[in-house]
Amino acid sequence: MKHMMVIPVALMIGLPWAAAGPRGDGYYGKTKVAPKVQVKAHPFGLGQVKLFPGKFKRAMKVNQNYLLGLDADRMVWPYRERAGLPIKGERYGGWAREDIVGQTTGHCMSALSLMYASSGDQRFKDRVDYIVSEIAKDQKMHGDGRTVAPDLREVLGE
């Protein structure tokens, strides 16, 4: 049984390191690797990409409508509950109802941020700003930097 645990742990630690490419300075860790070809591609911002009318533009609009249809107050429900603040709206179900609360909110905030970066539509930034401000209120209520996690003293029975 011990050997079966070693392999997954080794993979979890080793694969991300092995899969990582060189940093911008050409280093893999401590070893300098000379580029084989001249670098011709460089990163650019999402705001520099414009979609023409078609299926990709339609897909982006569908995603925008979905994201704007999510209720920010329902996203911060677990944070407010754990901070003892008044609840606004109903809590989302599924994973957002279980003990991995906050993960759905994090994915939502990432999607909203990427959509703002790609479209420049202020509504996405406003939604992220609202969620962050609500979580900050909840964090302040805890007084120790926590947001949604239970108090460790509570878990340990201290």
Image (cartoon, rainbow, N blue to C red):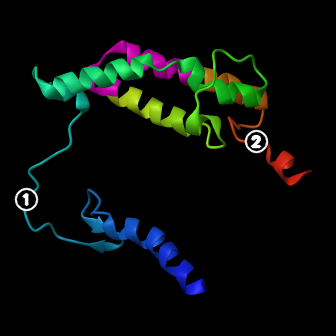
Please give the name of the residue rendered at 60% of the width and 84% of the height, measured from the top-left corner. 1
Residue 140 percent across, percent down from the top left: 73, 27
Q: Is 13 contained in the magenta span?
A: no
Q: Nearer the viewer, residue 26 or 12?
A: 12
| Residue 140 appearing in the image | no
Identify residue type, mark 2. Answer: Pro
First of labels 1, 2 by sequence position: 1
Q: Magenta stretch mostly in which secondary structure?
A: helix
* Label of residue 150 in the image: 2
Q: Which quarter of the figure has residue 145? A: top right
Please give the name of the residue rendered at 29% of the width and 67% of the height, measured from the top-left corner. 27
Q: Classify residue 76 as left or right of residue 154.
A: left
Q: Which residue is mark 1?
A: 38
Q: Nearer the viewer, mark 1 or mark 2?
A: 2
Residue 50 percent across, percent down from the top left: 15, 24
Q: Classify residue 46 as left or right of residue 134.
A: left
